């Protein structure tokens, strides 16, 4: 079998649960197999099962009750017609990526109905907890401000991002929240909105050299916190990893923060420890994957990953290589990949307060809308706000292994 076509283990677990709910006609509140049962059935680690279950919980397919187990959630017990009916009754888009994709493929002016208090939201994807928490913050703030949302996905393509901007503006949204693709390919639709003084706020990534409203997290400070923690634990061979196909401004700032922090320690920068240029879907389970070879050969004692999904894969690769976390290697992730409940997290991570970022983006956008309405013809006021991240220490970091240099 070609390894590039293999289904990820966590996805197999998720598919099994979905099929079990369907074939057994399980309804909301019915118990589903325990984590231990799933680990034995699929011969996988706990982290794989936790990753799968957490993903299902975020979609409301299941509900996890600490100390009691997991149960069928509300989404699984709904019929397809009920879901479609809900979509027509509300302009607010559900947090799950499936509904967001439906809104992306079938934008309809009729969704706006009789009110124009609609904000457009453009995201590349909604498949991780950063995005989900960000959308939750946006939705909460919009509700507090009396607005609803229309969400469209660019799916990582510049043209789709441009089309989404045009479509949402044509439907009459009052402003846009945009998680842009990257700074290397300027979207002329964004530049056009700036020239027309149309209200919009960029989230997570800004456009260097172009003044706009922007809300994000301080990436440089985030990697500095990570390096400081690992250095105190005795780590000197610290790698930073990004699977992003693009060197976005966010990625570059985090790498800059890493390099500055290492220089402050008097350490020489090892270019081999800045690991980029690979893709997670590029034969990730293969023994020939460059990241797996790097881990297996113990090139570093600690890894800083620039997203949560990547940290989970490094954890799993370490297990395949016969290494233990944190005894043999430590992992710090940007974002928590395993739990929507902080106390259940196992990953040491840089908390970016994405829920607050979403809320602050809405507040700034509503202010911009009101400024435009009350001061028509006046020069727009722009602001750039970086939220301070926080290091959350959990179970994936520890002192450098004594057997690393043996």
Image (cartoon, rainbow, N blue to C red):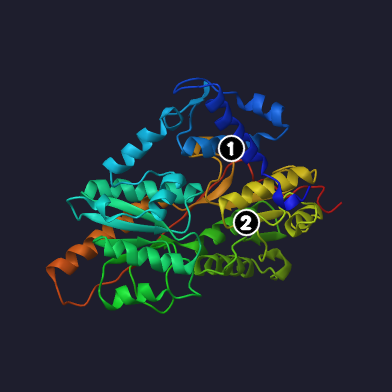
Query: In the shown orientation, is residue 208 left or right of residue 168?
Result: right
Element type at mark 2: strand
* Rendering coords of residue 107 (x, y %): 34, 55
Q: Residues within 10 Å of mark 1 (few under 14, many from 20)?
A: many
Q: Quadrant of residue 224?
A: bottom right
Residue ID at (56%, 41%): 338
* Rendering coords of residue 146 (x, y %): 20, 49
Residue 304 - label: 2
Element type at mark 1: helix
- Closest to the camera, between mark 1 and mark 2, is 1
User: Observer-nearest residue: 230 or 249?
Assistant: 249
Mark 1 — residue? 52
| Mark 1 or mark 2: whose residue is earlier in sequence | 1
* Rendering coords of residue 46 (x, y %): 66, 34
Query: In the shown orientation, is residue 406 left or right of residue 120?
Result: right
User: Observer-nearest residue: 395 or 354?
Assistant: 354
Residue 385 appears in the picture as rendered: no
Residue ID at (23%, 51%): 147
* Rendering coords of residue 88 (x, y %): 29, 43
Residue ID at (66%, 51%): 233
Query: In the shown orientation, is residue 309 left or right of residue 150?
Result: right
Q: Tell how many labels.
A: 2
Q: Residues within 10 Å of mark 2 (few under 14, many from 20)?
A: many
User: Observer-nearest residue: 83 or 36?
Assistant: 83
């Amino acid at each position: 079998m070609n390894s590039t076509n293999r289904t990820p283990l966590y996805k197999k677990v998720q598919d099994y649960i979905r099929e079990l709910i369907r074939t057994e006609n399980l309804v909301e509140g019915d118990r589903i197999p325990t984590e231990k049962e799933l680990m034995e059935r699929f011969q996988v680690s706990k982290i794989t099962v936790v990753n799968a279950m957490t993903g299902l919980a975020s979609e409301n397919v299941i509900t996890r009750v600490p100390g009691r187990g997991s149960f069928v959630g509300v989404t699984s017990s709904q019929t397809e017609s009920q879901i479609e009916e809900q979509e027509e009754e509300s302009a607010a888009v559900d947090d799950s990526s499936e509904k967001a994709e439906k809104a992306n493929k079938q934008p309809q002016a009729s969704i706006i109905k009789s009110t124009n208090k609609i904000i457009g939201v453009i995201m590349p994807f909604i498949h991780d907890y950063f995005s989900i928490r960000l959308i939750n913050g946006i939705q909460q703030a919009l509700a507090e401000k009396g607005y609803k949302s229309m969400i469209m996905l660019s799916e990582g393509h510049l043209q789709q991002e441009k089309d989404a901007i045009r479509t949402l503006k044509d439907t009459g949204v009052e402003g846009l929240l945009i998680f842009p693709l990257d700074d290397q390919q300027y979207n002329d639709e964004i530049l056009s909105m700036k020239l027309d003084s149309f209200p919009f706020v960029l989230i997570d990534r800004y456009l260097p050299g172009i003044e706009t409203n922007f809300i994000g997290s301080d990436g440089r400070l985030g990697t500095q916190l990570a390096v400081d923690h690992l250095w105190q634990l005795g780590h000197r061979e610290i790698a930073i990893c990004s699977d992003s196909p693009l060197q976005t401004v966010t990625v570059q700032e985090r790498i800059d923060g890493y390099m500055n922090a290492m220089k402050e320690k008097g350490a020489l920068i090892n270019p081999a420890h800045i690991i980029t240029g690979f893709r997670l879907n590029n034969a990730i389970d293969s023994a020939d994957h460059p990241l797996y070879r790097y881990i297996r050969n113990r090139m570093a004692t600690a890894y800083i990953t620039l997203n949560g999904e990547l940290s989970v894969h490094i954890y799993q690769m370490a297990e395949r290589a016969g290494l233990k976390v944190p005894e043999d290697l430590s992992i710090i992730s940007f974002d928590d990949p395993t739990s929507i409940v902080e106390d259940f997290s196992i990953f040491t991570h840089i908390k970016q307060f994405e829920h607050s970022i979403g809320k602050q983006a809405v507040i700034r956008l509503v202010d911009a809308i009101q400024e435009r309405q009350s001061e028509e013809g006046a020069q727009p006021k722009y602001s750039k706000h970086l939220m301070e991240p926080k290091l959350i220490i959990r179970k994936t970091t520890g002192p450098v292994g004594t057997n690393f240099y043996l």
